[in-house]
Amino acid sequence: MEALLKILEELHPDVDFEANKSLIDDKILDSFDIITLIAEINEEYDVRIPVEEIVPENFNSAESLYKLIQRLQDED
Amino acid sequence: MSRQTNILEYLENIVNIYPDKVCYANESEGFTFKQVYNSARAIGTFLYSQGHYKKPVVVFMKKHPKMIITFLGVVYAGDYYVPIDEEMPAHRIELIFKNLSPEAVICDESTKDKVKTFNYDKNVYLYDDIVKTTPDDTVLQGVFERAIDTDPIYVVFTSGSTGVPKGVVACHRSVIDYIESFSEVLGVNENTIFGNQTPLYVDASLKEIYPTLKFGATAYIIPKELFMFPMKLVEFLNEKKINTVCWVVPAFTMISGLGVLDKIKPEYLHTIAFGSEVFPMKQFLIWRKALPEAKFINLYGPTEATGMSCYYIVDREFSEDDVIPIGRPFRNTDIILLNEENRLADPGEPGEICIRGTSLTLGYYRDFERTGEAFVQNPLNDLYPELIYRTGDIGKYNERGELVFISRKDHQIKHMGHRIELGEIEAAIGRMSGIVNACCIFDNEKKKIVLYYVGDCSKAEVVNFAREKLPRYMIPHVVEKLDVMPLTTNGKINRLLLKEKYMNRKKESK
């Protein structure tokens, strides 16, 4: 989780990613942030987020994103 | 057909042919040519009746077909439209207003409150109010007859290196010249269904706005959020039967890079134009494989020459090491490559891309100095006055005689389809109290803007300040504090050293 928070903080140093649960709804993350995230998650956790999982629900908070990563790791 | 001198002739002509066909639409609402025509004429009548004629009128609205209708309305009044990004920070809007002294601002329900914070004391109008005006044919005919094709129709603001945005002024003639040549290359016709991605406040949106009017095509504004969720984006393209797109490169690579094209294909898409950045070949090949029958077109051009100036229609196989050329100039545009001695570059020799032709815009608004620096006498011609626009881009001809883009000459970068002067970011951060100096570099590989600064502010403070003062796409992705700024022997900030430092840091962190 820490590594994920670090990736997120590098994108937006001013956002509290542990508290914010509406990263998409509040328009904090934009389309290019999503791309960066997917690439960096791939590098850091060695998981490829399938395109069906690229939906607002999975990106609204660091927590839900981390759950997705764990789920994908388990599936491997 | 008689000679066209006014962009409104496109609409005046087509409304008689396809009055009830959808012209501009978004995900939920469509406007027919007749509706566009009536609404634009209502707005034109209103503005003229308020005494606004041959003046700049700011259009400050959310991205919507009504915004395009407003543009046309402003031109009907004989004024020129100045679209402003609704998300632009107040500070930058102030700079633009100072340069522009707008005669009026047109807003919508969603932006009207923000306008009140502008410190602007002239005329503010609400779209929904002024569109109710009854069009006055005599007034509009009078404006039309007095217009000439070198009269301005819009001003769009781009990034300027001193921190002050530059307003590029385009006239009827340059837009008509561009639209005619552009439509020919794309093969636009009445069956074209555009899917617009680019913001309406940049010249890129000319590609959908005017060919739609010229041919009686249809243009859908694609909701911005869909560019985050690519499966949904492709579903939207299929639902609306979109067959033609002119997008910035990152919008395409997002779809291909995430493997969407393996799951779902844009079924109707047959014409794919891209520009603003170099298309990474690996991603391009994925697109080509998914849509082998589609026509792919690489576009290149600066705002100062009204949109796009060069095109290349992909006509051969490319391998992963190739670069897609920018090809050749549009009809009635000429490109000259000038080397450091201001002479024509030899074949294969790099030179600055300079543009000649009717597509040149009029220059920068209320800025003769910077206009004079970029729009200059053709150094190859000492016989009569002839302007060229110096793009600051370096290109060369390949062995096939096609023009290839190499790099930027100065610190201007292309990022997410936006043209950014790194100097503008530096200038904005430099104004923050506590900042000693700031320098931006661009990580071309990872497409990140990196800001180094010296001063006693925290990183978070700097980022917060940047958010207030800069548009979103200009906010640095990486912010690093330094004790001292490295300087070159002439006392300038040593960008090369900073770039090295950043690249080393990246290696270490791996």
Image (spheres, grey):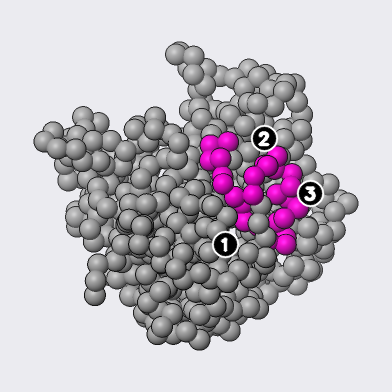
Mark linked to residue B479 = 2
Query: Is B432 positioned to the left or the right of B230 in the image?
Result: right
Q: Nearer the viewer, mark 3 or mark 2?
A: 2
Q: Which quadrant would residue B271 be assigned to in this image?
A: bottom left
Which kind of residue does numbered mark 2 sit on? Val
Q: CB atoms at circles 1 and 2 under 8 Å apart?
A: no
Horizontal and vertical percent position of residue B228: 65, 64
Q: On what subunit does the disc labeled 3 rest?
A: A
If the image is split into quadrants, where does the C terminus of chain B sit? Answer: top right
**Residue named by callout 3:** A5
Tag 2 secondary structure: strand
Among numbered discs 1 and 2, the one appearing first in the sequence: 1
Identify the residue at horizontal 72%, vertical 55% (top origin): B112
Q: Which residues are magenta?
A: B98-123
Identify the residue at horizontal 66%, vertical 52% (top origin): B124
Answer above or below: position of B197 versus B111: below
Q: Nearer the viewer, residue B117 or B183?
A: B117
Mark linked to residue B208 = none
Mark linked to residue B46 = 1
Horizontal and vertical percent position of residue B410: 41, 34
Query: Is B410 positioned to the left or the right of B105 in the image?
Result: left
Horizontal and vertical percent position of residue B44: 52, 63
